[in-house]
Image (cartoon, coloured by chain):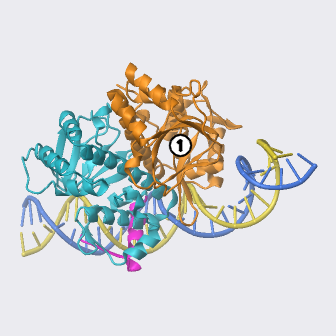
Chain colours: A orange, B cyan, C blue, D yellow
Amino acid sequence: MFVGTEGDSVQPVLRRLNALRRLSEAGVSAIKMAVRHRILKAAAREDLVREGDRPDSVRVLLSGWAFRYRILVDGRRQIVNFILPGDSCDAHIYLFSRLDYSIATLTPVVYCELDRESFEQLVSSDRSVAEAFYCETLAANSIQREWTINLGRRDALERVAHLICELYERLRTVGLVDKDTFFLPATQTDLADATGLSTVHLNRTLQELRGSGLITLKDRNLTIHDFQALSNTAMFNPNYLHLDRK
Amino acid sequence: MFVGTEGDSVQPVLRRLNALRRLSEAGVSAIKMAVRHRILKAAAREDLVREGDRPDSVRVLLSGWAFRYRILVDGRRQIVNFILPGDSCDAHIYLFSRLDYSIATLTPVVYCELDRESFEQLVSSDRSVAEAFYCETLAANSIQREWTINLGRRDALERVAHLICELYERLRTVGLVDKDTFFLPATQTDLADATGLSTVHLNRTLQELRGSGLITLKDRNLTIHDFQALSNTAMFNPNYLHLDRK
DNA sequence: CGTAATATTGATCATGTTCAACGTCGGTGG
DNA sequence: CCACCGACGTTGAACATGATCAATATTACG
């Protein structure tokens, strides 16, 4: 659904990119211009793109949550990452012929769709923009490595704690954490599919985290009571998010 | 250790990049020139880069095997991917301030080290080269997603079978498979750390694969007797490798 | 108010871990 | 030459984490 321009919806994109790599003034304006061009909306629980599609454009999420996933032939689903406001979906992906994943929304979303020409014009207009998008791709890569570690070598409690720490940090950089509380629209089934657990065990793991007073999760609102402790149980080290910009 | 130029060692790089994105004549020459510039060697079981290092250059593996890994504070190790001849290690990685992973060799390796200036000169010299390197980054991302799925939603047998299928396909594109047999320098401990299993269970899983006649693994040589069957047990779909270049 | 999606609980089961021992192979030094 | 050593691989047994199955709350919402 086409929407036209939308108030300050570019903000998370600027915050996200700027956290990864300092944007120039010119870069900021270029992004604002480009993003205004084609803004779309989608409802909750809707596929934005599907495995096998020909990738034609780069999508940038302005508001709402989405996730990348794949379903195996026998129905098992794995959520491979969450896409948060400000995140883009594979800059330059049109270089490939087919998508190997699907993206679905978790909430209603507003996003920007840049066709190949617009995107290339954008990144060639300013060096800091090109670098920031490259950083985004590298950061996505890094996050994906961390998920590999999470699923390969952490147990259920550590995994869930780690996911929560990651979401907290990522949401914080785009201003979506309010006093250690953030909106977590994923159901327990979603969280189970993201952490490689069964829903039953995910439920029990959440209860364990609640029981030890580390978090509260109620009505889709997650509060972290002791980030340091949560971080320790998860062995969370935020370096892989590359949000420092030294 | 500095080595100077080395015969046809660029070949795997050209094959790898060309499989992802057709290189122009000019691009091929540019790569040959750039790679000849600074060729290094390292012994087996040696760290090439370490977590926390400041990334200064882009590395391209010319021969031998390496792997990216991380070790958790309590000693658990996860191998997050294997780096095969022709693969590069994070084009543009110098945009970040710190590495969040280590890379170690599995065999003696020959690799090329391009500092930021050389690399940027290379990719700006030819559009197809820039696109090919971008594809490499996107493909790395895609492989990492597949590993996430592997660890999250496949059981031990499927996981190991899947890893073998992936290595087979990747090695084939750089000409390192001879009649369904390839050199697999990883120990069972390495394979366990790559698949998120214990060495004991990895050993038993390999025996199961051998027992059902799917593979032979002896003296570091792996033979696939029935790729179709192996592929089926792994639910392997090579699309995520993006080696088709449609 | 009724219904479907989501969350929770208990009980049983299975996959994979851990621990400990032993086997095998290829050096290496006496 | 051979005894020793270390790395790697293999085996058995006990154990544990997490899966599965099935039933029952709870909630959201038309």
Is residue A183 in view? Answer: yes
Instruction: Give the vertical position of C27 relative to A195 (above or below).
Output: below
> Going by the image, does A152 lie left or right of B105?
right
Up the image or down, C21 lies above or below B123; here it is below
**On the picture, is B240 further left or further right than B112?**
right
Q: Quadrant of residue A198?
A: bottom right
What's the chain of the residue with tag 1? A
User: In the image, is residue D23 above or below residue A147?
Assistant: below
Question: Residue D22, percent across and down?
Answer: 75, 65
The answer to which of A38 and B55 lies nearer the viewer is A38
Residue at x 22%, y 52% (from the top left corner): B45
Amino acid bearing label 1: Phe
SS under mark 1: strand
Q: Give the total number of marks visible in the rendering.
A: 1
User: Where does residue C20 sit, x and y in percent of width and height?
Assistant: 40, 63
Q: Quadrant of residue A141?
A: top left
Queried whether the magenta region covers residue B7, the answer comes back as no
Which residue is nearer to you in this view: B55 or B193? B55
Q: Is residue A162 left or right of residue B110?
A: right
User: Quick check: A52 above or below A10?
Assistant: below
Q: Quadrant of the C terminus of chain B?
A: bottom left
Queried whether the magenta region covers residue B206, the answer comes back as yes
Please say whether residue A213 is visible from this viewpoint. no
- Label 1 neighbourhood size at 10 Å, few (<14), some (14-19), many (20+)? some
Task: Estimate the x, y position of residue A1 in percent, counting from the top left.
Answer: 62, 41
Picture coordinates of residue A11, whole percent (x, y)? 52, 25
Which residue in the protein does label 1 denote? A82
Please identify the residue farthest to the top as the structure is shown.
A25
| Residue stretch in magenta | B197-219
Q: Quadrant of the N terminus of chain B?
A: top left
